[in-house]
Image (spheres, rainbow, N blue to C red):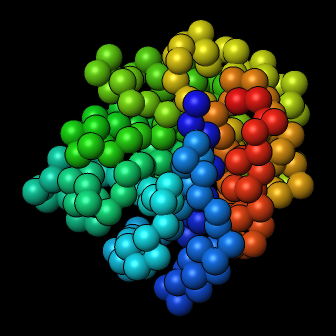
Amino acid sequence: MTKYVLANWKAHKSMSEAEAWLEKFCQLYRPNPQVEVIIAPPALYLIPMQQKLQKYTTEHLTLAAQDLSPFPPLGAYTGAMAAEMARDLVEFAILGHSERRRYFHETNQDVANKVSEARAANIKPIVCVDKTYARSQIAALSEADLEDLIIGYGPVDAIGINVPQSLEKIKEVIGEIRIIAPDKPILYGGSINEDNAGDYLAIAGLSGLMVGTASLDPVAFARICEKASYDDYVI
């Protein structure tokens, strides 16, 4: 089963810092065919980072958009990045992150529309949920849009505070999500770092990690990716 390790940079780094990060990470990174490493930089950096990745020709290392427009391309939507525009830049898109819901007031229907646009552009959606709205968020998706779905479980109270959710609680929520969306990969995100990543990777039923703050350091993120390659972790 494929494991995923996602670096969500959010609104961090200058272009020069992003290029330096990628150069350092590619020096440290050891590809594993069973581990998919995904980098989600700010949208402005997607084109130059894709060009850099082509130069390094590193396997199992891809890009993700941090967000996509819920509207179709070729429309009067100032400031929006349509999924079709990102088609040749990314393989994945993070959709419905709790910060988008909180600060940009996104609704379940907004996220569902983004998922439809992503799939139409052959971009795999990583839909973020919390326990409180997981059922309604997934229920808003069409049957067709569930096909390539990856679920990112990111409890609001564990994001950005350096206090990850307990292993027991995560196991409980994974079980509940499995009832709603059987057989879909589930990632956990919330205060993951190189010290605790192994504990979370060992949770049965979890398919990988979404890493925020710790992913800003290429050395720390490379170590997390290395832990995901260990055969003794049960995913």
Q: At 59% from the left edge and 86% from the top edge, which residue is drawn?
A: 20
For the C terminus, give its image quadrant.
top right
Q: How many marks?
A: 0
Q: At 27% from the left edge and 43% from the top edge, which residue is drawn?
A: 122
Residue 22 lies, in percent from the top left, at: 56, 77
Q: At 76% from the left edge and 45% from the top edge, which residue is drawn?
A: 230
Q: Is residue 232 above or below residue 215?
A: above
Residue 134 lies, in percent from the top left, at: 57, 24
Q: Is residue 162 above or below residue 17?
A: above
Residue 215 location, quadrant: bottom right
Q: Nearer the viewer, residue 194 or 98?
A: 194
Q: Nearer the viewer, residue 121 or 99?
A: 121
Q: Is residue 22 above or below residue 140?
A: below
Residue 130 lies, in percent from the top left, at: 64, 31
Q: Residue furthest left?
A: 74
Q: Residue furthest bottom?
A: 16
For the N terminus, give its image quadrant.
top right
Determine if residue 47 is in view.
Answer: yes
135 on left or right of 124: right
225 on left or right of 194: left
112 on left or right of 56: left
Determine if residue 105 is in view.
Answer: no
Residue 41 lies, in percent from the top left, at: 50, 67
Q: At 62% from the left edge and 19% from the top edge, which residue is drawn?
A: 177
99 on left or right of 111: right
